[in-house]
Amino acid sequence: MRILIANDDGYLAPGLSALVRACQGLGSIDVIAPEQNASGTSNALTLTRPLSVFEARGDHVKGFRVVNGTPSDCVHVALTGLLDYRPDLVLSGINNGANMGDDTLYSGTVAAAMEGYLFGIPAIAFSQAEKGWGELDAAAAAARAVIEQVLAQAPLGGAPWLLNVNIPNRADAATLPRRVTRLGRRHASEPVIRQTSPRGEAIYWIGPAGDAREGGEGTDFHAVADGCVSITPLQVDLTDHAAAAGWAARLAGRGA
Ligand code: MN
């Protein structure tokens, strides 16, 4: 098995090297990750300048390849020319903090995995529920356990799939129950934070994500709060299928 691993927190993030260590023995591994923290960049591709790739040095990142771009850039470049083979599996993470509910739309961690999925390759995004890397080794062991269980039940080479995994920051993460969930919903983000720059200009910080608004039974929020590893199968089609017929009726005969 050949595995491509990326992330969105940047190639120096502890979550990336922990995931790489946890995957040792599963197959050959290539790591291609962003040079800088690119959290919240969603599926962005860099189209206005060329991308550079260099090999990382240092104990925990030796052999990692680094792209001065986004998470999607990393996987896109890997799959369209940098790698001379097609990976069997794309992994992303482990992210510093949850990617649940509406987070998945903004997440670079999910996007890196999604880029693999868009190219027809099974992919899994991993996140720790809380920021700060608490119990990271346990999260990595949990990720390994999820990979092994998933591959035993969903062999590679068929139709691709995309899983979004959130892991509680607990020492027993690897032995927690795993629950298949749907995405919950968050409240709208906290208000923007306005400050004044040293030059007297108004500047704005995007506020933190809102709390769970729909975190009922069956959701990712509920599973993690309940001490489970949350596994949400994702799809890419944003079409509101339930609303399509209603819109067709409303707009009938009003075409240009
Ligand atoms: Mn991140």
Image (spheres, rainbow, N blue to C red):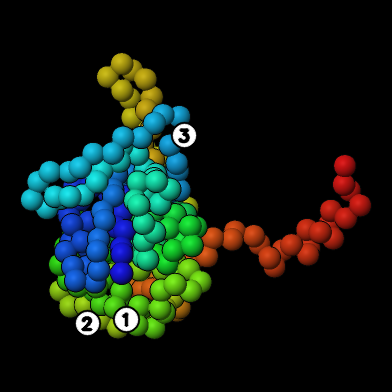
Q: Is residue 10 above or below residue 175?
A: above
Q: Nearer the viewer, residue 20 or 253?
A: 20
How many circles with numbers are drawn on the protein? 3
Picture quadrant where residue 153 is located: bottom left
User: Which SS class for mark 2?
Assistant: helix
> In the drawing, does residue 127 fall left or right of residue 254?
left
Q: Nearer the viewer, residue 217 or 22?
A: 22
Q: Distance of mark 2 from mark 1, alpha carbons?
A: 12 Å
Which residue in the structure is indicated by mark 3?
47
Q: Give how far across and how far down residue 132 sits, in percent.
A: 19, 56
Q: Amino acid at mark 2?
A: Thr
At 36% across and 56% down in the image, what residue appears?
85
Q: Distance of mark 1 from mark 3, alpha carbons?
A: 38 Å
Q: Give how far across and how far down residue 96 sits, in percent.
A: 26, 56
**Crowd band around label 2 with a 10 angstrom C-alpha radius: few (<14), some (14–19), many (20+):** some
Circle 2/circle 1 CB separation < 8 Å: no
Which residue in the structure is indicated by mark 1?
149
Looking at the image, is mark 1 or mark 3 earlier in the sequence? 3
Q: Is residue 100 above or below residue 145?
A: above
Tell me if residue 114 can be seen. Answer: no
Query: Which residue sits furthest left?
Result: 59
